[in-house]
Image (spheres, rainbow, N blue to C red):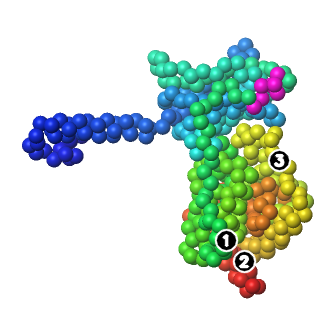
Amino acid sequence: MDCGLIFPRMELPKGLALLRTGLTGLIFFFFVTLSVFARAAEVTGVRVGENAGKTRFVLDITGAVSYSVFTLPDPYRVVIDLPEMGWRADEQGAGKGRGLIERYRFGLFEPGTSRVVLDLSGPADVQKVFLLEPQGPYGYRLVLDLNAAGRQSFLASARKPIARSDTTPEIAIQPSPGDRARTGPYVIVLDPGHGGVDPGTTSVIGVQEKKVVLDMALEIKKAIEKNPRYRVVLTRDRDIFLPLRRRIEVTRRAKADLFLSIHSDAIRNSRVRGATVYTLSENASDTEAAALAAKENKADLIAGIDLSQETAEVTSILIDLTQRESMNYSARFANYLVPLLANDWVVRTNSHRFAGFVVLKAPDVPSVLLELGYLSNKQDAQLLVSQDGKRRLSEALTLAIDRYFDALESER
């Protein structure tokens, strides 16, 4: 660094010259410190080993980190929370295990916290958790040892911290427009499904659902907001996990006029393709809709959420009636969207279906879940990541939104 670029070179009294030297050194120290802290720790490798009934899980990390470890039952899981950090161990942030570990997943759980979830083949005790300092060719290593255990032993230690991080930040929620009358633009919430430690489906071309739907949501947002009549709020705008109930909370805090959850599923028959629009009903319209809802409603389990304290749904008559009215408006929007999608997009037979998706249960917001297509079908998978596909879908959605709100305004 040329100090003359910070303080011009000129003759100064001795005291001022010393001050300039001191300040220059301080600024230099600040820049060096900033550059060090800007490089967050990263996971560079994952190793799973098995010996004499013990399973060892090792994360290679570029720096010392705090960590928190706990277990969750049904299904059996070990959860490791770390500071927000990068993942260079592999491209997908997931992999197969061995021994007591069936597989693992890594992702951003909430701002400031990255999470590793280990799916276990059965109940196990966490025997040791420790951080090794660099030695020889190895850098920092976070090590976790597991031994097989009985169910009762596992349940006795479940949900109890084995090692605790310093802090666990709260999830940042999109700010609401405030407690104002409905005078501004219509608020539309776009909810890209999955994210962070919950990758969703992986397409036949190797792209994960969480990325496909986020990229599509960002494109849809740009298209909708070309019209100042609308304001778009995203439940997530990066690769981060968001619990299903928190997605509903974001929607209500934003005072949304319409909620669109965006997904892209996969099925065994790779020849099947096309979009499907779902609206809320406790009675699924078919077995496929029921299976899909059951799968999507398990997202919180995948991310290592403890659901044991989940409160029951409010069942008052007022909430029930409000939700029924919202369900009717949801169906109306779906009836605009389906034919517009069919004009320039492949849609499934019986393309408007009904199922009990948790994410659609905001009682006072019309809500629709859009399955963009099937990542198990090569044509759909390629179309969904293409600019042409994003443009076509964005145009159809924008037109459906226009027609829906035009119709509401004409009834007032």
Q: Residue at x 20, y 38 (%)?
A: 19
The answer to whether marks 1 and 2 mark residues whose Cβ atoms lie closer than 8 Å is: no
- Secondary structure of the residue carrying tag 3 is loop
Q: Which residue is mark 1?
A: 397
Residue 125 falls left or right of residue 172: right
Task: Identify whether 232 is placed above or below 293.
Answer: below
Q: Which residue is mark 2?
A: 404
Between 187 and 317, the one nearer to me in the picture: 317
Seen at 75% across and 22% down, the residue is 125
The image shows residue 411 at horizontal and vertical percentages of: 76, 85
Question: Vertical placement of 256 versus 4: above or below?
Answer: below
- Secondary structure, mark 1, is helix
- The 10 Å Cα crowd at callout 1, few under 14, some 14 to 19, many 20 or more, is many
**Which of the image's four quarters has the N terminus?**
top left
Q: Marks 1 and 2, Cα distance to the nearest angstrom?
A: 10 Å
- Quick one: label 1 or label 2, which is nearer the N terminus? 1
